[in-house]
Image (spheres, rainbow, N blue to C red):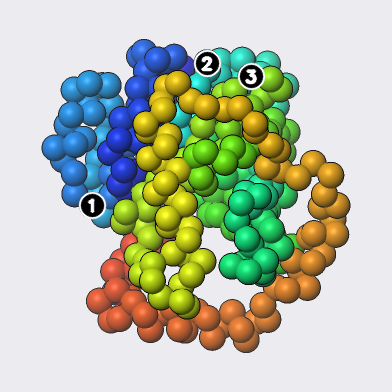
Amino acid sequence: MISFLTPYWSGREMMRIHLASIRRFYPTAPILVSKKGEGREEMEAHRDEFGIRYWIEECEYVDALLRLLQRCETDYVCIMDHDAVLLSNPDHLLQGLAQGLWNLVGIEERIREPAWLDWQRLEPESNGWFRFAPGRMDATFLMFNWREFRDRWKLRGIRGEPRKNAINFEYHHGICDKLSRHKYLRPFHTSKYGFGNLLKDGDAAILWHQWMGSYRTRLVLRKNEASNSFRGETMAAVEHGERAFLADYPALDLGGITPAWWPEADIHAEQELVAQRHPSFGQRGLGRVSQWRSYGLSGLATRALARLDRWRRLH
């Protein structure tokens, strides 16, 4: 049996579609949700309709994921973002895991910026990458045998280490490093739904991911500030894309899709370029100090307690 785990912050409409899509193909599979902040009324509604188990807990994404994995009682697990919606049954991917054809299924961190985004003006340091950490996967959709992983590496095994030749780093990248036989779903862009990707396995559309589904609470933006033009335009695109998706779903317009993983790219050359731009030890230290100052004393205390709780769970 497989369990579905979803760390969740905000975005009720996407969350409901996400849960409904899981129940469409897995009517009885456990669905475990860690809800950040308030929202008991919403979560009770989801529990009544979809039979989920949920916990309201004030913690960051990494800690929510750790807690959900601790609660998972099935052999297999599928970690999903709340803004990821299954479009077809992924059972063949689960069967491939069981047969040993691969030991990890997901989307590679190798996604180009959409063609309509002027990244050279708004974010030149990305060199056109929306996500870039080749060989690793985002937790948009991450399927593997949790029991085998846990028995061998324990919960602390999910922790990865940053790489100089990658732009993005996520705490769970340790899973991607230890489980090396990867099955990648391929991302595609379509202009109608903004920052979203259609994820396919060959010709089969497996799921849709509407990036930044918690933008209402995650992104604190002032759209009209010139210094924040990239984030302002990103926010507008995220809002527009989600509205278009919700208006069309389930009759989505997926015509005219284009590859988002840049199949002809010289990935080694791209990695070397990223490594050359990697900040020095001193620059990273100054950035960390600046970040700490922005938290304030109460924020630092809260983070310290959260790190202590994480350390206890890992050990």
**Within 10 Å of the Cα at label 2, are there few (<14), some (14-19), or many (20+) other Cα atoms?**
some
Who comes first in sequence, dot 2 or dot 3? 2
Picture coordinates of residue 26 (x, y %)?
41, 15
Q: Is residue 264 visible in the rendered structure shown here?
A: yes
**Amino acid type, label 2:** Asn
Q: Nearer the viewer, residue 9 or 68?
A: 9
Q: CA distance from mark 1 to mark 3?
A: 36 Å
Left or right: residue 32 versus residue 117 is left
Who comes first in sequence, dot 2 or dot 1? 1
Mark 3 lies on residue: 204
**Within 10 Å of the Cα at label 1, are there few (<14), some (14-19), or many (20+) other Cα atoms?**
few
Q: Is residue 151 visible in the rendered structure shown here?
A: no
Left or right: residue 204 versus residue 286 is right
Residue ranking furthest to the left: 41
Q: Residue at x 23, y 45 (%)?
A: 56
**Amino acid type, label 1:** Gly
Q: Secondary structure at mark 2?
A: loop
Viewer-nearest of discs 2 and 3: 3
248 w.r.t. 291: above or below: above
Q: Residue at x 51, y 45 (%)?
A: 194
Locate residue 7: give its quadrant.
top left
